[in-house]
Amino acid sequence: MSTRPASQPACDLLSERFAAVRALTEALVMQLSDADATVQSMPDASPAKWHLAHSSWFFETFVLRDYVAVYTLHDERFPFLFNSYYEAEGSRHARAARGLITRPTLAEVMAYRAGVTAAVLRALPDLPNEAIALVELGCHHEEQHQELLVTDLLHLFSCNPLEPAVWAPAPKQPVAVPPPIRWIEGASGIVEIGHDGRGFAFDCEGPRHATLLAAHALADRTVTNGEWAAFIADGGYREPRHWLADGWAWVQAEAITAPLYWREGDGRWTRFGLDGRRAIDPAAPVTHVSFYEADAYASWAGARLPTEPEWEAAASAHDPHAGNFLDSGGAVEPRPSTSGPAFFGDVWEWTGSAYRPYPGFVAAAGAVGEYNGKFMSGQFVLRGGSCATPRGHARASYRNFFYPHQRWQFTGVRLAKDI
């Protein structure tokens, strides 16, 4: 790879993108107190303060430390605190204990961010191409943490008996319940999936390769809250025949009776969001459901979950910018909208595909090679992005992945069937 600095126009564009990504992360925490940003609600979630610092540690470690000769670490103790899972970078603070880091304070973390941001912007014009690629990767990495920051905050505030609203509720709009699902025949035969090499992609999105699709159809929209309420009313969480064995064991052990953040009272369902507790919108896509729940609903509906090749083949014809995202151009209050035809935004869509490497996948050398490959075990793929995903972050080949019991992300369901 060339060691020459990037061209001036390319450097200017990356500087603008880097600054915009950093600013959006900080906009997400403007209304938080130091306590809000410090507490950790569960081992799967991290404090907002940790997300703010970790995304700075990434740039400081892989760009500034390794490619700027005169750079001095902001604080030599921070790599231990804010490394996430990079074994090659040495020991680190336990993930489940991140909420115990009361110091540095939120203000000190923001000062750390400011220092790293300024140092990267100063260094960019002279960075070699391999470092420029790491800055680009770091921007996409930080966008992932923007989504995690939002969803972790949602889980945190849901644990507060006061159920505080972080953002004001959206203006009440008339509910337009979508018509019944229509089935759209998908591509069949040999198709190619995976990133085509144009623009940025994470390593797990390639190599592009051929795969065989049998005849199938996909639903023209995602499952709504209203439809999920019918599943509950029909005994969906009480009838084992629709559930995988592990899913049924999870339902029993955790006493699961509805999507995460739903509550029944006075004959109606409500949900908790960052705008407080509100009545469920029957037209909005159901969200915060696990793979187990998604699979059980699909069985109850006489359908199945799409495979990731089926989903990608269909989504490739759609604009990945057209959905409902966490938009850096305006509001940063994530809310699923009315379930519609977009394959992108609103809710991550569970697929029936295990998260495994594509044929020919090779992890990158060095610590950044730990980014995705080592997690290719025991997880399922989600596609499409959500209302908490920054606009422009998703694409047809993008592969998100979670364990089948996890549901604190904005996860939803699109059905498929064989034809």
Image: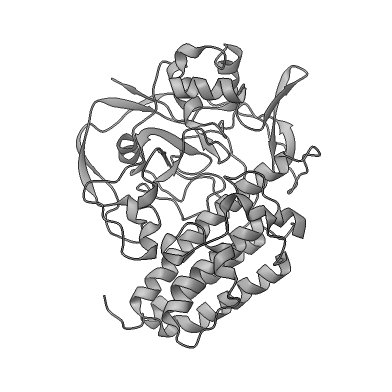
Near-viewer residue (292 or 264): 292
Q: Is residue 159 above or below residue 6?
A: above
Q: Answer with the quarter of the image where residue 62 lies.
A: bottom left
Residue 33 visible in the current orientation = no
Across and down, in percent, residue 336 comes to 59, 39
Q: Quadrant of residue 312?
A: top left
Quarter of the image with the N terminus in it: bottom left
Residue, x 57% and y 20% (percent of image)?
252
Left or right of residue 132: residue 120: right
Q: Residue furthest bottom?
A: 70
The image shows residue 318, relative to residue 196, as above or below, that is above
Query: Whole-percent x and y of residue 353?
Result: 35, 34
Q: Tell which of 415 and 351 is nearer to you.
A: 351
Residue 337 visible to an observer of this rendering: yes
Determine whether, in the image, residue 172 is placed left or right of residue 56.
right
> Which quarter of the figure has residue 266?
top right
Residue 108 in the image: state x and y as whole percent.
70, 71
325 shown above or below 310: below
Pick whichever, 212 or 185, lies toward us. 212
Quarter of the image with the C terminus is: top left
Residue placed most toward the observer, 87 or 64: 87
Q: Residue at x 33, y 33 (%)?
A: 307
- Which residue appears farthest toward the right when viewing the image? 162
Residue at 43 percent of width and 18 percent of height:
299
